[in-house]
Image: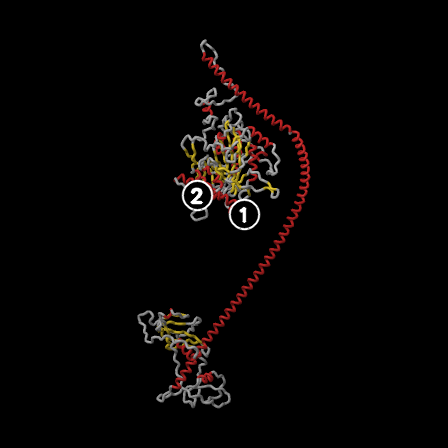
């Protein structure tokens, strides 16, 4: 039979009214808090919650409170039954009526989403209760298995009863397969433990339809879709192969579906729970710092109910593919949003958390853009394809079905940040409205004559009691289990009453026709039964062979069981030995780790000591180098100072000699020498020696005038030494006079050395307006007119004396200034001695004819320390 897409409620139902919109219904469920005194959220009434944010440590921080409104709020005392009756039971009614519905749980990790969706055997969640209510409702209206078969294009096709029976037998007695299937595990937790079934039923089931339930289980992991019910293929070398990702496609009715996703037909809740358990064993879960079993993927459990009208016999489904109706309920358990700082995720778990947060952010962006388009009338493109989850539910968000969301929150105070984001998302989601078409779920599948009927009563009113239609010539077949209504009135009240006979004749003809039709149907059923019986007898002929094979298989099975027991016994012994060796190995490793830790500590301590010693040596060497550098620097400074002193003394010496030579060469006959001053000298008691030869004629030593400036002193030094003559300084203006009204008039610049010592003498230089400096700069000479160099030196008698070199500050032609020295004053203090002044007899004039003697000779005699026996004449 050619497979075709069944008639879905979205496209095949008639449009009977204008489109209306309804908001997305959002419910809130509060998880019981571990500490009731430390909570940040509480319920206020039946549909409001209050979020309390404490003040942080920042300045001017104040506690804040927010109030959020929901469709209904379930507090900590709410049961799973109450949540199901309010949230999911209306969705099950829509599913039975052929509508598409979507329910998903949203919240942070550890807020109770999986518990709300699944629960446990004693307190079941939404998913098990939905299955219980569905099978309670369609218990006596289920079609035979394999009558409806998926066509891999999001649709179903109807098979004959014989084809369905053949497939059922092949399923019961499968042929041996070369490729092994996925090994089965233990039974589902809901089947191993006694559970409390939900006895609720819903209305809306018609006797004119047969129903079949199909389930599928997929997950969105790292933004890729995987089928949790897919049988894993095996390779003899590499073993079981990894799961293949699935693609999302769009069918002819513009609905999104997962291509090549396995859909399993179930006939009772136990079969459905086995499918759920098989999918949950493959679902990715991991342990984090906040949750022992945290979902690492978004799971989607789809329940699809296919309903088709019965044929004229009332036992089979009509074979017209365009007469079936499909409803779908999608239950989505979203993975919780996570913060890496709190969950301490690393490696693969960090990548999983990133993909989870990206998917949830894409869902929020889609909701935001939908709300913006509806509120402001914009036409922004909704990014459904940015995530596999939003791409899969694109048709729901665009208006094909009802959407409900359960927001699960943890009221603990340390979850206030994540809870605030969840509340904001829920508030935005409630503002989104979904466009739906009223009345499109009121149609029923087509009848054999091609006409659509809204309900069974209209179908019966359109057909007569005799099985004919009132508006069409084609008769509509009626059930063939009776020959028609009761006989009409056959009483003849008049001999010419022909109408009664004609009515009786017509009634009998219809009855004979129905009888013939019943005979044909019975004959057809007999032929079908005979062919089926022959087929069964043919299969029974192979029964002895099959029994022999079963006997051999059982014997082989018993041998394998015995071998398995022996192997298990040996395995247990080996496991015990392995545990003992493992314990010994762990003890040895622990001892080795302890010794290694001691060695590492000793090595670290040794390296630390070595590094400390090296650092100390480096510090000492650096200190010694610094001291040596300071010593060398001090020596250089002293050497420079001494050289400068020697240079100045040489300059003075040369200057004295030059003046002496000039005085001797510049004598004139008109000048008479002044009378010489009588000097007294002290001689030693050594024996008398002849006088030394007369030196060259001496000239009177004139008084030493002060140098005009330090620059002139350097010039004299350079000219006397005749080494590297420097360019002459710019000439000063000797006639320069400062205004008396200026601020620089009679202002002295006193220049002292840094180690200047106050002598405490009574005679002190008196400078009215002065400025004292220790280091002379160009800036200091701008606003002064006079200069005083205060110089201290140690005299020959061991006393400190102060010399004051005075001069004028004159500007130069180049814009600078120079100091021209005028005179030198000296302040000296000495020891008064023994109070008696020595006198010496007057000396005779020497042959030199002068009262001045050579300086070197006078100094030599002055410092002579021998005793004098008697005065001698020089």
368 or 29, nearer to the observer: 368
The structure residue drawn at horizontal position 66% and vertical position 29%, both measured from the top left corner, is 544
The structure residue drawn at horizontal position 46% and vertical position 48%, both measured from the top left corner, is 57
Q: Please name the residue that numbered disc 1 is placed on.
A: 347
Q: Give the left or right position of residue 184, taking residue 71 as reference.
A: right
How far apart marks 1 and 2 lie (CA) works out to 37 Å
54 or 637, nearer to the observer: 637
Judge whether 483 appears above or below 425 on screen.
above
Element type at marker 2?
A: strand
Count residues near mark 2 (Cα–Cα under 10 Å), then give few for <14, some for 14-19, many for 20+. few
Does residue 33 appear in this view? Answer: no
For discs 1 and 2, the disc positioned in front in the rendered view: 1
Q: How many marks?
A: 2
240 or 488, nearer to the observer: 488
Q: Which label is found at residue 46?
A: none
Count residues near mark 1 (Cα–Cα under 10 Å), then give few for <14, some for 14-19, many for 20+. few
Mark found first going from the N terminus, 1 or 2: 2
User: Residue 754 location, x and y as percent?
Assistant: 43, 70
Query: What's the image's color scheme?
Result: secondary structure
Element type at marker 1?
A: loop
CB-based contact (under 8 Å), mark 1 and mark 2 = no
The structure residue drawn at horizontal position 36% and vertical position 89%, both measured from the top left corner, is 669
Q: Which label is found at residue 64?
A: 2
Image quarter of residue 852: bottom left
Image quarter of residue 441: top left
Q: Give the left or right position of residue 836, taking residue 571 as reference.
A: left
User: Residue 288 location, x and y as percent?
Assistant: 54, 44
């Amino acid at each position: 039979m050619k497979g075709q897409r069944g008639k879905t409620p979205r496209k095949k139902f008639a449009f009977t009214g204008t489109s209306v919109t309804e908001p997305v219904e959002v419910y809130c469920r509060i998880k019981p808090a571990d500490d009731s005194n430390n909570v940040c959220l509480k319920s206020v009434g039946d549909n409001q919650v209050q979020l309390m944010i404490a003040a942080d440590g920042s300045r001017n921080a104040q506690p804040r409170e927010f109030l959020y409104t929901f469709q209904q709020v379930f507090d900590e005392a709410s049961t799973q039954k109450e949540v199901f009756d309010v949230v999911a039971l209306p969705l099950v009614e829509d599913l039975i009526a052929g509508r598409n519905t979507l329910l998903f749980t949203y919240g942070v990790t550890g807020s109770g989403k999986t518990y709300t969706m699944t629960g446990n055997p004693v307190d079941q969640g939404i998913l098990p209760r939905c299955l219980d209510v569905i099978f309670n409702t369609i218990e006596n209206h289920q079609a035979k298995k394999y009558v409806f078969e998926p066509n891999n294009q999001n649709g179903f096709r109807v098979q004959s009863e014989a084809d369905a029976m053949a497939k059922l037998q092949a399923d019961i007695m499968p042929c041996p397969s070369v490729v092994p299937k996925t090994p089965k595990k233990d039974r589902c937790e809901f089947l191993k433990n006694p559970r409390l079934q939900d006895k609720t039923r819903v209305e809306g089931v018609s006797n004119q339809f047969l129903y079949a339930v199909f389930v599928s289980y997929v997950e969105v992991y790292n933004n890729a879709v995987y089928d949790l019910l897919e049988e894993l293929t095996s390779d003899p070398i590499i073993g079981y192969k990894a799961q293949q990702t699935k693609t999302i496609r769009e069918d002819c009715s513009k609905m999104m579906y997962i291509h090549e996703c396995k859909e399993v037909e179930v006939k009772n809740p136990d079969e459905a729970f086995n499918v759920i358990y098989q999918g949950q064993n493959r679902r990715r879960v991991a342990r984090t710092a906040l949750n022992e079993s945290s979902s690492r993927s978004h799971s989607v459990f789809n329940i699809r109910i296919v309903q088709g009208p019965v044929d004229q016999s009332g036992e089979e489904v009509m074979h017209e593919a365009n007469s079936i109706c499909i409803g779908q309920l999608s239950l989505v358990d979203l993975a919780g949003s996570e913060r890496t700082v709190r969950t301490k995720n690393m490696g693969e778990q960090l990548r999983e958390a990133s993909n989870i947060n990206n998917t949830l952010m894409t869902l929020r962006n889609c909701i935001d853009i939908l709300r913006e388009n509806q509120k402001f009338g914009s036409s922004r493109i909704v990014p459904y394809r940015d995530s596999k989850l939003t791409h899969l539910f694109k048709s729901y968000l665009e208006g094909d079905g009802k959407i409900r969301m359960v927001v699960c929150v943890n009221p603990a105070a340390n979850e206030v940040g994540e809870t605030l984001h969840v509340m904001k998302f829920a508030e935005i989601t409630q503002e989104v409205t979904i466009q739906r078409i009223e009345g499109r779920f009121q149609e029923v599948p087509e009848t054999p004559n091609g006409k659509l009927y809204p309900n069974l009563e209209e179908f019966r009113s359109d057909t007569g009691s005799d099985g004919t239609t009132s508006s069409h010539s084609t008769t509509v077949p009626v059930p063939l289990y009776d020959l028609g209504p009761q006989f009409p009135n056959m009483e003849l009240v008049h001999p010419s009453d022909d109408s009664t006979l004609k009515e009786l004749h017509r009634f009998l003809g219809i009855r004979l026709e129905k009888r013939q039709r019943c005979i044909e149907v019975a004959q057809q059923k007999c032929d079908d039964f005979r062919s089926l019986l022959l087929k069964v007898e043919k299969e029974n002929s192979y029964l002895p062979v099959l029994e022999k094979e079963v006997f051999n298989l059982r014997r082989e099975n018993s041998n394998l069981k015995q071998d398995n027991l022996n192997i298990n016994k040996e395995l247990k012994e080996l496991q015990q030995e392995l545990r003992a060796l493992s314990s010994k190995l762990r003890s040895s490793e622990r001892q080795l780790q302890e010794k290694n830790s001691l060695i590492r500590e000793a090595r670290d301590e040794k390296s630390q000591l070595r590094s400390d010693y090296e650092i100390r040596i480096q510090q000492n060497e650096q200190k010694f180098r610094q001291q040596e550098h300071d010593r060398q620097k001090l020596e250089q400074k002293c050497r420079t100072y001494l050289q400068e002193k020697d240079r100045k003394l040489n300059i003075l010496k040369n200057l004295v000699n030059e003046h002496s030579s000039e005085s001797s060469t510049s004598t004139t006959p008109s000048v008479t020498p002044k009378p010489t001053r009588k000097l007294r000298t002290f001689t030693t008691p050594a024996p008398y020696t002849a006088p030394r030869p007369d030196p060259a004629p001496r000239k009177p030593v004139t008084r030493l005038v002060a140098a005009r400036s330090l620059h002139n002193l350097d010039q004299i030094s350079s000219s006397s030494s005749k080494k590297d003559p420097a360019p002459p300084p710019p000439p000063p203006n000797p006639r320069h006079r400062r205004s008396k009204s200026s601020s620089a008039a009679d202002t002295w610049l006193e220049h002292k050395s840094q180690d200047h010592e106050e002598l405490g003498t009574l005679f002190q230089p008196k400078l009215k307006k002065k400025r004292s400096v220790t280091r002379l700069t160009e800036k200091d000479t701008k606003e002064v007119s006079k200069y005083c160099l205060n110089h201290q030196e140690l005299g020959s008698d061991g006393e400190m004396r102060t010399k004051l070199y005075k001069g004028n500050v004159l500007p130069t032609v180049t814009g600078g200034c120079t100091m021209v020295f005028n005179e030198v004053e000296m302040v000296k203090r000495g020891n008064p001695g023994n109070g008696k002044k020595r006198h010496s007899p007057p000396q005779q004039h020497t042959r030199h004819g002068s009262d001045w003697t050579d300086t070197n000779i006078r100094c030599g005699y002055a410092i002579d320390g021998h005793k004098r026996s008697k005065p001698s004449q020089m």
